[in-house]
Amino acid sequence: MPLALLALAAGAFGIGVTEFVIMGLLIEVGGDLGVSIPAAGLLISGYALGVVVGAPLMTTLTARWPRKTTLLALMAVFTLGNLACALAPDYGTLMAARIVTAFAHGTFFGVGSVVATTLVAPDRKASAIAIMFTGLTVANILGVPLGTWLGQSFGWRSTFYVVTAIGVAAFAIIATLVPADRAAPEQTRLRDDLKVLARPAVLLGLATTVLSWIGVFAAFTYIAPLLTEVAGFDEGSVSPILLVFGAGLVAGNFLGGRLADHRVMSAVLATLATLAAALLVMAFAIHSQIGAIASVFLLGVAGFATVPPLQMWVLNKAEGAGQSLASSFNIAAFNLGNAIGAWLGGAVIAGGFGLAALPYVAALAPLGAFVLALLSRRLETRSAPAAAPLCPQA
């Protein structure tokens, strides 16, 4: 694997820390800026909204730029946005800075996925995407806990100053290691790019991504109370168990990439079925402490194993001029799933069903995603005979 993939992973690491570290600093941010914890929690929702809006917007604005230039510009937005977060004098400014920072998120992963696939042989494309996303998984294992400790020890602003420095380093690494585009991006009209998004296979892929991560975040958002109130752990045990979840993310990321290198659609179906099964296992295992730890690891593996196949699926179906836009939309779809999943989990709890019901409800989403993926494969199978005469006979 070329070093350029590590450069993309470095950028993904910084973005991952920015997205998730705020979860561990809500008390510090709320206390310093004089807002409630729920209001501070909206900084997470604001970031997710920024990803959903910013992914198509930034991809469209940079569509005719060389991809390396786009990546560098996005890292500049990311770096300046985090600096603005560190300097924010009030809650409103911090929210605005978080949203601006999020604008870089979707397009970086979308364009980065396309760049990653150009750096390797055709049979390693999904693994290349997985290596880039390794930065995101490492951010969850190391970056977020360290950023949380730093913010709690030296003030939440110190965390954002450090993330700003990470952005500067990532910018320099990408500038040094990522090769310049071999050819200028294909010049197309926005209308033509949007037509790619109207393809049934692409739409089914985006919908499948949303559903799969509704399932992940309906359970994961409330993992701390699940571990303390259902499994019976003390609060001090939550952080070490989350490291187990992070280890599962890394394992699942590489596993999903390797599976998708062989057969993308089969990998999509297999990982979605495994995710649904992992959530159902959690529904039973969460009542035992040993079972809870095992199910948290399994959720991490199954959850992130879906990412490379789903991203590769959309890239394949959007092949052509609109590939970067479709890829960025898929990243937005992951974040939309995150937001809806968190809301769904809260609705289950507020509805009086209890924490123990969360895994059952969460499992319904990847099951729905599995049905959509199966429908897509059947549609492809039906259309295959029309294409057969064009292929050379064996």
Image (cartoon, rainbow, N blue to C red):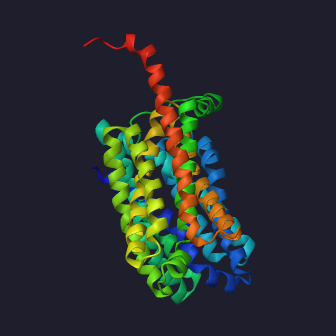
With respect to residue 196, does 369 lie above or below? Answer: below
- The quadrant where residue 222 appears: bottom right
What residue lies at 43% left-to-right and 20% top-to-bottom?
Answer: 384
- The quadrant where residue 97 appears: bottom right
Report the number of discs: 0
| Residue 102 seen from this side | yes
Residue 54, percent from left and from top? 63, 51
Q: Residue furthest left?
A: 394
Residue 262, percent from left and from top? 30, 39
Residue 324, percent from left and from top? 52, 40
- The quadrant where residue 214 appears: bottom right
Q: Nearer the viewer, residue 156 or 389?
A: 389
Q: Nearer the viewer, residue 56 or 375?
A: 375
| Residue 8 seen from this side | no
Residue 128, percent from left and from top? 35, 48
In the picture, measured across the screen, residue 95 lies left or right of residue 322, that is right
What residue lies at 58% left-to-right and 59% top-to-bottom?
Answer: 361
In the picture, measured across the screen, residue 45 lies left or right of residue 114, that is right
What residue lies at 49% left-to-right and 39% top-to-bottom?
Answer: 373
Query: Which corner quadrant holds the C terminus?
Result: top left
What residue lies at 35% left-to-right and 14% top-to-bottom?
Answer: 391
Q: Nearer the viewer, residue 284 or 80?
A: 284
With respect to residue 284, does 62 lie above or below? Answer: above
